[in-house]
Image: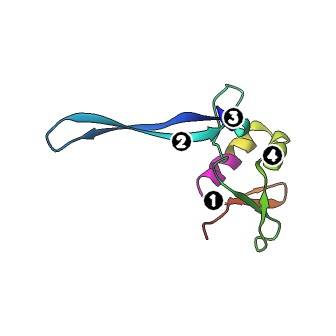
Amino acid sequence: MEHGLSPSLFGIMMLESKKGHMGFKINLHWTDHQFMRKDSFHIEMDNLSRFNIERSGDFENWEDVSHEELDTILDQVDEVRAKNFLAVVRGGGISRLDGDYYRIRPRS
């Protein structure tokens, strides 16, 4: 596919109609596998590629961070620290890494 994007199964939910018929709802989202990190067991870590990430040194002034730069920074830390960082940020929290704070850019 174009730009290295491919559909990933996000979730399957069983639905029951009012008449008792069962059906399935499949939610798909597009994932940029270029920035998909895997752990030592080849399990995918939380993916931030769908979000704009910001960084701040003082928790006041925020600047955009490219996914390439973030990937380079995460390459320099151990796997457990990278997993924790990605999970916190993906969950909507703010995480500190090498003296800077990172978050998903809030919607305007």
- Spatial CA distance of label 2 from label 4 is 21 Å
Which-is-in-front pick, marks 4 and 3? 3
- As drawn, which residue projects farthest toward the bottom? 60
User: Do residues under tags 4 and 3 come within 8 Å of each other at their CB atoms?
Assistant: no
For the residue carrying disc 3, how many other residues have a C-alpha within 10 Å: few (<14), some (14-19), or many (20+)?
few
| Lower sequence index among marks 2 and 4 | 2
For the residue carrying disc 2, how many other residues have a C-alpha within 10 Å: few (<14), some (14-19), or many (20+)?
few
At x 76%, y 74%, the residue is 60
- Spatial CA distance of label 1 from label 2 is 22 Å
Which-is-in-front pick, marks 3 and 2? 3
Horizontal relation, residue 31 to residue 9: left or right: right
Q: Which residue is mark 2?
A: 29
At x 67%, y 25%, the residue is 41
User: Do residues under tags 1 and 2 come within 8 Å of each other at their CB atoms?
Assistant: no
* Secondary structure category for the residue under label 2: strand
Residue 13 placement (x, y as % from top left)? 36, 39
Give 61 or 1, whichever is nearer the viewer. Answer: 1
Magenta residue span:
85-93
Q: Amino acid at mark 4?
A: Glu
Q: Amino acid at mark 1?
A: Gly
Residue 99 placement (x, y as % from top left)? 84, 59
Q: Which residue is mark 3?
A: 4
- As drawn, which residue projects farthest toward the front? 2
- Spatial CA distance of label 3 from label 2 is 14 Å
User: Do residues under tags 3 and 1 come within 8 Å of each other at their CB atoms?
Assistant: no
* Secondary structure category for the residue under label 4: helix
The C terminus lies in quadrant: bottom right
Q: Quadrant of residue 94?
A: bottom right
Q: Amino acid at mark 2?
A: His
Residue 93, label in figure: 1
Q: Which residue is mark 4?
A: 68
